[in-house]
Amino acid sequence: MVQPSPVQKIDIFSSQYPTQDSNNITVDFTDNGGIKLDSNTNYAIALKSASVPNSNNNIFTASTASAAGYSQNNLFKYVTRGVPISSFSAVGTPAANQRTFYFVNTFNADFTSGTISAGDKITFMSVTDVDGAAVSPDPNVECTVVSVDLAVSNMGLSSIVVDVTTDIGDTSTWPTSFGGGLITMYTAGERLDVTRNIEFPASYMSVDDMFEYLLDQFVTAGFYLTADGIYRYYVNFSYYHPTTSIYILLSNNTLFDVDISDTGSIAPLWGFNRSLYSGASASSFVSQNIVDITNGITTMLVNCNLTFSTYSGNQPSHSIYSYSPGLHGAANDISVATLDWIPIIPSERISSLNVYITDNKGRRVDFNGEYAYYGLVLSAIGQKEKRLAERDYIMTNNRKRRIN
């Protein structure tokens, strides 16, 4: 490896350029007449040090995916499937003058907080059927609460039984089920599916981060049981490191499904095919493919426009240094002991310099406004050094292409 004597060190702090993208910094040297080069001398550049924010996302929402050139992959759904109303012992079969109303428990704080109890009056505002047509005799319908079942909220639902005959008269003309704002009414014996969507935020998450996020969402939704102060989840997850496999576990496969069939689902990162994984067929499922938790991100490339364009991973590149991204949230602090000298395009003067970072697929990394620092070294090299540097550069990039 060629080690010429450096002639100029160039420090670039993105914080000094607040109007520019922190991952696309252009330094203008024209105010100082530029960096003058000897036309009879060959030059090379190397990265000596850097501090780069580790803001490379592996999870993208619909809005962030298109901007970064990735696919959306942040959706997860779970389903409380085909729950027959009569299966809830606390509710049972309502009397002829009663109706049972089920609702997703997080939609109405009054119900889930337990502030409604037997004997209370509740008002249904503008009750409509599934097509939006009014079905109640009055725009405001008051009913007496017979009982409240919050226990079933652990399945993603809550229920109340109300006396409808005493308060609002004959309901024989009402449909067997209808939507009324946040409440849906079902008669005894009907079955009810409730699907909940969970969206991961655009971020970098490890497998454990994703599992923890989902379990937190389950707790928020009341989708769990407790025993001796320990949470028991209806849907759980496990990561088996030796085979890099992810398992989806259903505690009661007669009631629950996991739906990751959407185009924008989390399935590819977990190694699953996009599909509905129904508890009717099994109580556990294992990923069919290799877990790709990095979303294909294996290498970061520091690029400088002064170098000749080459290819890395079949993508055009002006790479002068590569590194593996570290843990999200911590900066990648780089200190290079043996500099990798990259020949620059011949010129008599350097008027500006552009530096930025891409991943191994040529996609620009979003620093989310966080600052970066680059310490570059520019050096004169002789003809022999230039040939050796070019050889090293070509060999390194050929290795990268084979790897990618």
Image (spheres, rainbow, N blue to C red):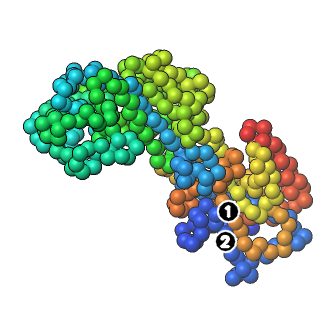
Vertically, is 240 above or below 217?
Answer: above
- Secondary structure type for disc 1: strand
When asked about the image quadrant of residue 18, the answer is bottom right
Q: Residue drawn 78% across and 42% down?
A: 401
Query: What is the distance, in whole Å, between disc 1 and disc 2 at their CAs?
Result: 9 Å
Vertically, is 241 above or below 332?
Answer: above
Instruction: Spot the residue most to the left.
Output: 119
When asked about the image quadrant of residue 385, the answer is bottom right
What percent of the width, then of the height, locates residue 321?
A: 70, 52
The residue that disc 2 covers is: 27
Amino acid, disc 1: Val
- For label 1, the crowd category at 10 Å Cα-Cα, with few meaning under 14, some 14 to 19 and many 20 or more, is many
The answer to which of 164 and 226 lies nearer the viewer is 164
- Secondary structure type for disc 2: strand
What percent of the width, then of the height, locates residue 54?
A: 54, 51
What percent of the width, then of the height, locates residue 182?
A: 30, 44
Q: Quadrant of the C terminus?
A: top right
Q: Residue drawn 23% across and 35% down?
A: 171
Cβ–Cβ below 8 Å for labels 1 and 2? yes
The residue that disc 1 covers is: 355
**What's the mark number on residue 236?**
none
**399 sits left or right of 383 in the view:** left
Residue 160 is at least partly visible in this image: no
Vertically, is 34 above or below 2?
Answer: below
Amino acid, disc 2: Val
Q: Residue drawn 19% across and 26% down?
A: 96
Q: Residue drawn 68% across and 75% down?
A: 28
When asked about the image quadrant of residue 6, the answer is bottom right
